Structure formats: structure tokens, C-alpha cells
Amino acid sequence: PEHVSARDVDCEIGRAHLRVALRGQERPILAGPYPAPEAVRAAESVWSLERASGTLVVHLEKSRETWWECVVQGEPCVDA
């Protein structure tokens, strides 16, 4: 949505899950566990909001280098 600031974003990057939502919204934009058995180094993972475009960028530092078919379980697969 337009006019969203970083304060409006609730991004929780956990070792085994990701949750992205807008504060005050009941339903998250994206939420779920990473593809089993994958995990991330949460302390080294970050998110940012690009002001000009309003794009949310999430950088997940994986625990091991491998291809994930999807960001979180239940979401559409990414082409290899």
C-alpha cells in the first residue's frame, strides 16, 4: 500500500519461520515455516523498506547454501 513506513511493518525473522504483516492488520502478508528442514541465521538476516518504491526487501541468511523451492511452506514454488 501507498504511504507505508518502516514503523508500519511487522517483520519477524525466526530461525525456522518468517512472518511479514502490516501493523493493525489481522492477516499477515506472508507467514509460515521455511521449507523443511531448512533454517536461517536470524541474527544475520535483515529487512528494509525501500522508500521510493515502497518495496519490502527481506534478506535471509541461510544456515547452509542450498536451493529453496519456496520462501515459506504453502507459498508458490519459485522457478529454478
Image (tube, rainbow, N blue to C red):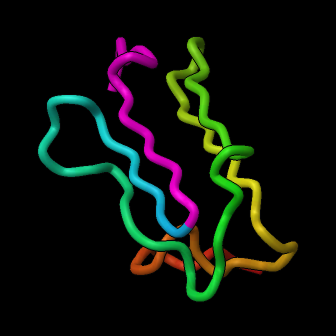
Q: What stretch is highlighted in magenta?
A: 1-15
Residue at x 57%, y 62% (from the top left corner): 15
Residue lying at 87% horizontally and 73% vertically, measured from the top left: 65
Q: In this view, does 80 lie above or below 16?
A: below
Dividing the image into 4 quarters, which one contains the N terminus? Answer: top left
Left/right placement of residue 54 relative to residue 60 reads left
Can residue 7 be found in the magenta stretch?
yes
Could you say where residue 23 lies in the image, as x and y percent from the top left? 24, 30
Q: How many labels does the image show?
A: 0
Q: Position of residue 5 (x, y in %)?
A: 41, 14
In front of the other: 79 or 51: 51
44 lies left or right of 20: right
Residue 3, image x, y percentages: 35, 12
Residue drawn where x is 67% and y is 63% of the image: 40
Closest to the observer: 54 or 28? 28
The quadrant of the picture occupied by the C terminus is bottom right
Q: Quadrant of residue 11?
A: top left
Q: In this view, does 4 lie to the left or right of 60?
A: left
Give the residue furthest to the bottom.
37
Q: Position of residue 64 (x, y in %)?
A: 83, 73
Which of the pair 71/3 is nearer the observer? 71
Q: Nearer the viewer, residue 6 or 45?
A: 45
Against 20, residue 32 (above or below) is: below
Q: Is residue 53 left or right of residue 19?
A: right
Answer whether residue 71 is magenta in the image. Answer: no
The outermost residue toward the right is 65
